[in-house]
Image (cartoon, rainbow, N blue to C red):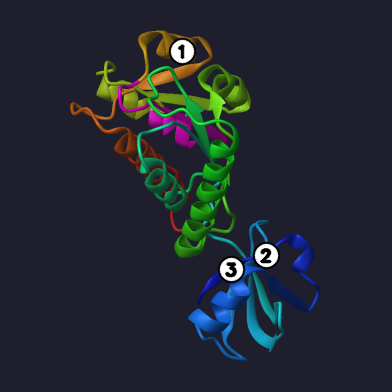
Amino acid sequence: MYRFFVPEENVGDLEIRITGDDVNHIQNVLRMTRGDEVVVSAGKGIDYICSIEEFQETEIILKRLEDKPSITELPVRIVLFQSLPKKDKMELIIQKAVELGAAEIVPVSSRRCVVRLDGKKAEKKLVRWQAIAESAAKQSGRGIIPNIHEIISFKEALAYAKELDKLLIPYELSDNMSDSVQVLQEASGTGSIGVFIGPEGGFERGEVEEAIAAGAVPISLGKRILRTETAGMTTLSILMFLIESRLGGK
């Protein structure tokens, strides 16, 4: 079934209203008709199984058939702190991070970032990135739309991550794989994880030292140097696997 997100105020006891761009998409692109069933989420961990009741000019009225707890959200909150990459790589990173279960993506302006975004240009990018997150959440069956945070500095990112249980920073000079495996396994059993990914040139040594002083643990992802768009996906994939393996058949 197709999945759509609505604001919480659109959820009634018996009916749910779909508004905005999804109205045109359902009617004219998907060509759905009265009686067709869809899944709706208000971002609260509940999936509403609904049938289309009525098409109106600016909204679609759905009938609530069944409420189910969403089973696609990880029990561990993962925040990806992604240093701004070149060109449109951030779009791919956001799409894949959402698919892999990240709860939030924080764009970070670290020292070796070539891209510098501010003012209206940054606002325009954030709107675009949030739309990509929503699209990826629909496609992958997420129960929430992960938030794309405003762009912040590396120092601000460390302060923002202070409340998270475990901070990880993949670093090419970290070569102890056995220790890294243990760190990742321990992180998968916590309540929240922050993952710091550097830009194309990597983090400066001083930034890594700042992160370690703030509680981050350097980890190795193998003997090869990974691109910035690969490093985040690799770390999230490992964490997703470890976290979900703890759930067993649940």
**Residue 78: image x %, image y %?**
51, 39
Kind of residue indicated by mark 1: Ile
Kind of residue indicated by mark 3: Phe
Tell me the tag on residue 6.
Answer: 2
Q: Is residue 78 above or below residue 222?
A: below
**Is 19 situated left or right of 93 in this image?**
right
Kind of residue indicated by mark 2: Val
Q: The residue tagged with tag 2: helix, strand or loop?
A: loop
**Residue 77: image x %, image y %?**
56, 40
Could you tell me how far apart the alpha carbons at marks 3 and 2 are, in whole angstroms?
A: 7 Å
Q: Residue farthest to the bottom?
A: 34
Q: Are marks 1 and 3 in contact (CB under 8 Å)?
A: no
Q: Are marks 3 and 2 in contact (CB under 8 Å)?
A: yes
- How many neighbours does mark 2 have within 10 angstroms: few (below 14), some (14-19), or many (20 or more)? some
Tell me the tag on residue 168.
Answer: none
Among the 4 quarters of the image, the one containing residue 204:
top left
Q: The residue tagged with tag 1: helix, strand or loop?
A: helix
Q: Mark 1, mark 2: which one is toward the viewer? A: 2
Tell me the tag on residue 212.
Answer: 1
Residue at (64% x, 57% y) in the render: 45
Q: Give the extent of the magenta segment.
A: 184-202
- Mark positioned earlier in the residue sequence (1 or 2): 2
Residue at (25% x, 32% y) in the render: 226
**Residue 133: image x %, image y %?**
51, 52
Write down the residue under mark 3: 4
- How many neighbours does mark 3 have within 10 angstroms: few (below 14), some (14-19), or many (20 or more)? many
Work out whether residue 2 or residue 74 is closer to the camera in this orientation and state it: 2
- Mark positioned earlier in the residue sequence (1 or 3): 3
Q: Mark 1, mark 3: which one is toward the viewer? A: 3
Q: The residue tagged with tag 3: helix, strand or loop?
A: strand
Q: Is residue 195 above or below residue 102?
A: above
